[in-house]
């Protein structure tokens, strides 16, 4: 498939696909006229690259990971590095869940204040803690 079709099928810009190729993350064959041609598995590869970027992995780490994804070969160092990245992501998830819980408490307090006509207690105040405990 051509680069425009790959971009459309993955919702990734043509510019990003070219960048992936420059970084060694994505390969393309060239037609006699120089146009990029991608195999059908390029769609899954691009989606994986997007997920890894979204998880905060840098292109260098993703490039090191790709041979493992393609042929299943990995070094102990790569496994260690990926485990550290997974642990970092787990910590982000924990932190985000705690932030969500605090926002839920603020929303609950604000909703209660709308119904009672009382000012919304400040998050983290003793009154807010009492209100949350009673909710």
Image: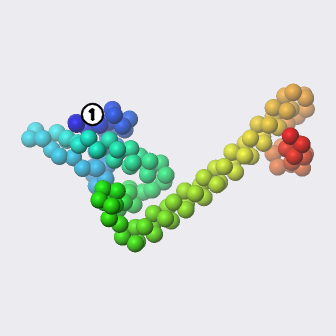
Considering the numbered disc 1 on the image, is that residue within a helix, a strand or a loop?
helix
- On screen, 57 above or below 29? below
Can residue 6 be seen at all in this image of the molecule? yes
Res. 60 image quadrant: bottom left
Decide: few, some or many residues near mark 1? Use Cα within 10 Å; few <14, some 14-19, many ≥20. Answer: some
Q: Position of residue 108 (x, y in %)?
A: 80, 37
Q: Residue at x 42, y 57 (%)?
A: 58
Total count of labels: 1
Q: Residue at x 33, y 61 (%)?
A: 72
Q: Is residue 8 left or right of residue 109?
A: left
Q: Position of residue 90 (x, y in %)?
A: 58, 57
Q: Nearer the viewer, residue 34 or 108?
A: 108
Q: Is residue 72 left or right of residue 96?
A: left
Q: Is residue 88 left or right of residue 125?
A: left
Q: Which residue is mark 1?
A: 4
- On screen, 17 above or below 66? above
Q: Residue at x 89, y 49 (%)?
A: 126
Question: Where, quadrant-wise, is the C terminus in this rendering?
Answer: top right
Q: Position of residue 32 (x, y in %)?
A: 8, 41
Q: Position of residue 29 (x, y in %)?
A: 17, 46
Res. 82 image quadrant: bottom left
Question: Where, quadrant-wise, is the N terminus in this rendering?
Answer: top left
Can residue 66 be seen at all in this image of the molecule? no
- On screen, 27 above or below 37? below
């Amino acid at each position: 498939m051509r680069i425009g079709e790959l971009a459309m099928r993955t919702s990734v810009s043509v510019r990003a696909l070219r960048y992936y190729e420059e970084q060694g993350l994505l390969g393309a064959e060239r037609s006699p006229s120089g146009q990029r041609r991608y195999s059908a598995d390029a769609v899954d590869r691009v989606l994986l690259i997007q997920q890894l970027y979204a998880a905060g992995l840098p292109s260098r780490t993703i490039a090191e990971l790709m041979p493992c994804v393609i042929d299943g070969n990995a070094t102990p160092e790569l496994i260690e590095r990926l485990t550290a990245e997974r642990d970092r992501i787990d910590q982000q998830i924990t932190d985000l869940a705690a932030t969500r819980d605090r926002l839920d408490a603020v929303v609950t307090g604000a909703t209660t204040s709308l119904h009672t006509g009382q000012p919304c207690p400040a998050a983290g105040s003793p009154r807010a803690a009492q209100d949350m405990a009673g909710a």
